[in-house]
Image (cartoon, helix red, strand yellow):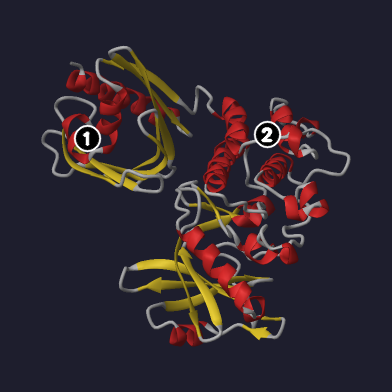
Amino acid sequence: MSDSGATREGVPTGPYVAAGFEAPSPAELSARLPNLEVEQVLGHGGMGVVYKGRQPFLDRNVAIKVVRPDLLANPESQQRFLAEARTLARLEHPYIVTVYDFGKAGDLYYLVMQYVDGSSLRSRLAAKTITERDVLDYVPQIGEALQHAHDNGIVHRDVKPENVIVDQRNRVRLVDFGLARIFGGAIANPSDNRIAGTFGYMAPEQMSTPDKVDHRADIYSAGVVCYEMLCGHRPETAMSPPSSMKGIDARFDPIVLKAMERDRERRYQQAREFNAAFTVLSRTPESTIRLEQTVRAPAERLFAAWTNPAEMMKWYAPTDEFSTPIADSEPRVGGSYRVGMLEPGAALPRVVAGQYCRFDAPRVLSFTWAWETPRRDEHETQVTLEFQEQGDVTNVKLLHERFRDDHRRQEHAKGWTGCLARLARTYSS
């Protein structure tokens, strides 16, 4: 009932024909979309075809999803598509594939999306390469993506391994947001309240009362995906806990089984609750840095110190010998940042970059983290800051997680200790 995501694998051969629709070749589609260069077919499904292409003026790769014309055959369905596409285009988050544009070329409606150079979770399951550390890293990212979508009034309805893409730095992207809702029915339209999703991953209410499905259905599906990553198969009707499989940590059992409760009132009621339970396991001493620093300054001022480029340049480096010649920031969820730290005698700065995952001023700030130079990090990590104001001081709590190399973790712990000390010296009043 849904398409594969924006990924480089699984190129089909031959024409794609469904419901009388024969997909155009890349050359034919390029001719109809003059601002795009269409290179190859990435995948196809019941709703249409996904291509890889480029936006030459912006010099970036994109994924282009062409929707079957018969699914948008009447003005009402076309209006729903346009309304939903506008909503999805505003849904920007590091762990969700971004919709850049949408439009119509002749009888074809299409979406232009972020291209992810990676592989689907389905392919990784098929290759049997998923480790327990992968589960601990991927599931919280899926949960953050779902919470962001739910906060924006969107229920995915089709969370499954095919719709989870993992890039080369181990960042997860949730794809195909909204399509099940577009074509499975908007809640406000009783004539369109039919079943939407994929059997085996759908919450019970998606089958029994599809007109009443809410965000808790996604939590059920995320639980199934987690179970499959741990056990190598979906849960059976008579559900056994994950630890019934040899070698699986029994601490997963209560978390996964609660997410998969058939009665949605007994599940986690928010994706953030599922994440909170899960991160108790994922934030191990080997994978996580935890530091605190008390600063004699209000939380609002310190939050700005991490997000305002002019302020970041005052202190953002591990020692006083460094300078900070580069600081750029788009202070919003999904916005990017970039910081360069120049060591004495060095020709070029060390540059780190990422995107904001949570922006709750002045209390919580979370962002992805990866070195760009002098060497590009193999794995991306994530930093979360909490600013707890207590009278005339603020306690800054820093948590840096998803490390897979202890030497690198220790290096970062030393660097962050120096950064927090500089923060306190700069802003204590």
What residue does disc 1 label? 312
Q: Is residue 375 left or right of residue 422?
A: right
Q: Can you say whether 39 is above or below 84 in the image?
A: below
Q: Can you say whether 305 is above or below 119 in the image?
A: above
Q: Residue furthest top?
A: 391
What residue does disc 2 label? 268
Do we see residue 7 in this rendering? no
Q: CA distance from mark 2 to mark 1?
A: 38 Å
User: The N terminus lies in which quarter of the figure?
Assistant: bottom right
Q: Is residue 323 left or right of residue 404?
A: left
User: Which three-letter amino acid code belongs to the residue tagged 2?
Assistant: Tyr
- SS label for mark 1: helix
Q: Quadrant of residue 379?
A: top left
User: The C terminus lies in which quarter of the figure?
Assistant: top left
Identified at 76% across, 60% down, the residue is: 195
Q: Quadrant of residue 199?
A: bottom right
Q: Is residue 234 left or right of residue 166?
A: right
User: Which three-letter amino acid code belongs to the residue tagged 1?
Assistant: Met
Q: Are marks 2 and 1 in contact (CB under 8 Å)?
A: no
Compare marks 2 and 1 and give the one earlier in the sequence: 2
Q: Is residue 131 left or right of residue 213?
A: left
Toward the viewer: 72 or 92? Answer: 72
Q: Can you say whether 54 is above or below 418 in the image?
A: below
Place of residue 158 in the rendered image (x, y in percent of width and height, measured from the top left): 67, 55
Instruction: Please name which of the two marks, 2 or 1, marks the residue nearer to the observer.
Output: 2
Place of residue 233 in the rendered image (x, y in percent of width and height, measured from the top left): 76, 46
Do we see residue 35 in this rendering? yes
Place of residue 153 in the rendered image (x, y in percent of width and height, measured from the top left): 56, 50
